[in-house]
Image: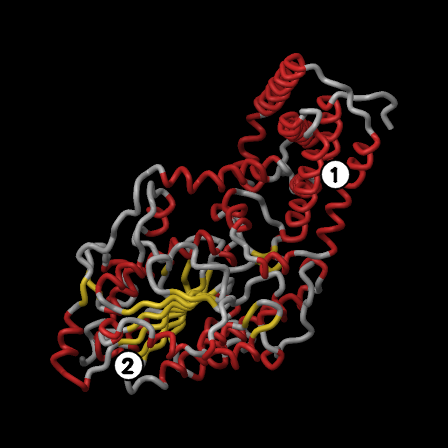
Amino acid sequence: MTRGPLTPRMAALVIALWVAIAGNLSLWTELHKLAGENELGRNPLLLGGTIFLAAYGAIATVLSGFTGRRIFKPAMLVLLILTGCVQHFMIAYGTVMDPGMVANVLQTNTTEARDLLGLDMLGQCLLVAGPPMIWLWRLRLAPQRGWAAVWRNLVMVLVLLALTVGVTLSMYRELAPLLRNHLELRFAVNPVSTLVSTVSAVTKPLRKSRNGPLVKMTAGAALGPSYAAAAAAGSTARPPLFLLVVGETARADHFALNGYPRDTTPELAKRDVISFTEVRSCGTNTLHSVPCMFSPLGKAGWESRKAETENLLDVIQAAGLAVLWVDNQAGCKGVCERVPNMSTEKPFAPAADAAAKLCADGECLDRVMLAGLDERIATLPAERRAKGVVLVMHMMGSHGPAYWRRSAPDTKRFAPECATQALSQCEHQDLINVYDNSIAETDRFLGAAIDWLKARDDRYAPAMLYLSDHGESLGEYGIYLHGVPYAFAPEVQKHVPMVFWMDKQFAARGGTDEACLRKRRDEALSHDNLYPSVLGLMDVTTPTYKPALDAFAPCRGKSGA
């Protein structure tokens, strides 16, 4: 215990030392592993010591910004609790707090947040925040005098910055290749990376808004020749009913359709679907992938954009078709703002019976999205429905870590299940079991969706395209969940399933050859292909359509219309 009073400046240096050691166990564990793999060079102790000094300097610099006598203790409490919570996620799931992860966290709804809470998080918070807070509670802070205190605080911040930069530069030749090979280390200093990433994530929308209004992409959007041909055919021609299902957290390598040895997709196999095996996502989290996959810009263009643009649904609606977004997730990330949309969180009378069976504890299984859907469609403008309907369903899918909540009891074929959010504490096979059950539930929903479409083929020409937003890590390389920055994310977070089904009427409208598509199922595709492929399938013409990226174009015009 400190005998006399300390200034907040000195106390901040002490707490920074504690945080550098106890609040960065993930970083030190990773460096220890890299040292064992001979990736810290010829003098790992020197490089490790350099990283420690640089981390301490960065942490102390941040903490020195809160050395006002009145705010010091409350600010330290908040920062220490934050450090403990972040360390829990870094250790338990192998995550890093880059701006994308922080933005994803900020958009997490209460249900998802509940799934992430647990005794492990409480334990980490107590480990990191408990001892220093007991010390602070008993510590007497020395008084500070006006501008003299401000000046001394500023000098200390500058000294700490100089220390951090100087130490980093002194070992730059050794640090540079290490950080290039292990980009995750750039976001590993806790809580500095969290605070910096939070500022970046919060200010990003403000930076975007200064670049002008929404960029229009709907100019020139129109319905193609198949609609005129259908009008000429009269009552015998049926308008298209296209269901686009945006999956959540599904791995392509856990779909039996793609060669996975477990039968996770029996319902889809019965319905003669086409599974595309080599599809890569735009991002590794929903906030990034969903708006990116609906964008006309593609991954590279979307990530370098200077302003927000209209998307696929805006173009389809502008062409004259009816559009409806149905959400069973944490929102559409801006994609559905300008089209009719609804969420399963809001009560809907025609779906009440299904909700009673499929919803519990504030969330619903995805099959509830099919309940009352005819009534929802009936609310769309009749003149648009007469031309065709595009439905988008945003699934809960396999969202973790509470995977056991993602499947119904009668879907759980693989046992025993991992039934805790502390995934690293589960047997690996139990984790695989519970995840595979969630994939089986997705299969069950997609099978039911296809049956729902088939039951309406007397009024429509139906088709369905399913595509997941990103994949998931299940303990490979010590990483769980998703959201690892794309540049160094494992393949399992980027390799996603894509499944297509159409009935004969839909195939005939566009002359789409199913046999041709089956021969092309192993070709490399990505989220970049979604925008032009849906436009092509729906025969919507627009200057933003890129035929070279239309995955179905090579197989259209090959069957009789």
Q: Is residue 268 visible?
A: no
163 sits to left or right of 547: right
Task: Look at 40% across and 82% down and name the residue there.
Answer: 452
Task: Look at 43% across and 55% down and name the residue there.
Answer: 333
159 sits to left or right of 257: right
Decide: is 313 above or below 236. Answer: above
* Other residues around mark 2 within 10 Å, as few (<14) / some (14–19) / many (≥20): many
Task: Look at 68% across and 49% down and name the residue there.
Answer: 88
In the rendered structure, which amino acid carries the disc numbered 2?
Tyr
Q: Quadrant of residue 453?
A: bottom left
Q: Which residue is mark 2?
A: 460
Q: Secondary structure at mark 1?
A: helix
In the rendered structure, which amino acid carries the disc numbered 1?
Ala
Q: Which residue is mark 1?
A: 22
Question: Residue lying farthest left?
Answer: 232
Question: Where does the N terminus fall, quadrant-wise?
Answer: top right
Q: Nearer the viewer, mark 1 or mark 2?
A: 2
157 sits to left or right of 250: right
Residue 304, position as x, y percentages in the image:
36, 42
Q: Is residue 71 visible?
A: yes
- Seen from the viewer's position, the closer of residues 145 and 256 is 145
Question: Where does the C terminus fall, quadrant-wise?
Answer: bottom left
